[in-house]
Amino acid sequence: MKKLDTNKLTDKQIKFFNEHLAYMATVNKEGKPDVGPKGSLKAIDANTLQYLEKTKSEAYDNLKNGSEAAIVVADAPTHKAFRVRGYAETHEGDDYAKKILKDTKFPNAYVVNIKIDEIDA
């Protein structure tokens, strides 16, 4: 993959993120990696990805402790893929989280926004 000269997703890239399963990698304070799928992850605008943290997992702890997130979405048949890197803003029970969670099946989830710093394609 090659780093792009922008940190903004195109409309096609937003659609791609929203149609494929994303995997996110983080690291803990000791540098131990964690990677897993984020089924609720979607691009909410050209510079922000969002997912609902329902399990309060190790990845969530890593993000809260300052880990960078690396997120990959891929289409296996075509081998097309994108990777983004960025840092998270977490929302636990604040007005923003309540607004986002209002019409979901997960009223007790946390909302995680990841601001995109880099895009690789």
Image (tube, rainbow, N blue to C red):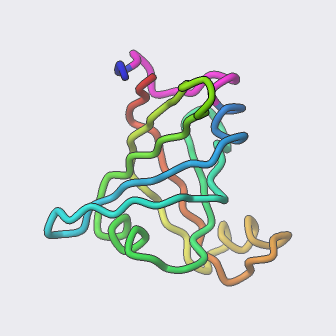
Q: Along the horizontal axis of the image, is 76 left or right of 60?
A: right
Could you tell me which residue is drawn at 49 percent across and 51 percent down? 23
Residue 55's quadrant in the figure?
bottom right
The extreme top residue here reads: 5
Task: State the residue lying farthest toward the right.
Answer: 103
In percent of width and height, residue 56 lies at 49, 79
Rendered residue at 72%/32% (across/down): 15
- Which residue is the extreme one toward the bottom? 108
Q: Nearer the viewer, residue 25 or 114?
A: 25
Find residue 59 and report its horizontal and vertical position in percent: 40, 68
Magenta-drawn segment: 4-13
Q: Position of residue 24 (x, y in %)?
A: 45, 53
Figure quadrant of residue 17: top right
Indicate the position of residue 79 as horizontal and vertical percent values: 54, 26
Most common secondary structure along the magenta stretch:
loop
- The image shows a total of numbered marks equal to 0
- Tell me the residue at 45%/45% (across/down): 71
Q: In the rendered view, does 58 fall on the left or right side of 17?
A: left
Identify which residue, 82 or 97, lies in the foreground: 82
Is 84 in the magenta?
no
Query: What residue occupies the far front of the structure in this picture?
Result: 77
Q: Please determine whether, in this image, residue 26 is positioned above or below residue 29.
A: above
> Up-down: is 105 above or below 35?
below
Q: The N terminus appears in which quarter of the rendering?
A: top left
- Who's the residue at 14% across and 69% down the image? 30
Query: In the image shown, does 22 or 65 lie closer to the viewer?
Result: 22
- Locate the C terminus by quadrant: top left
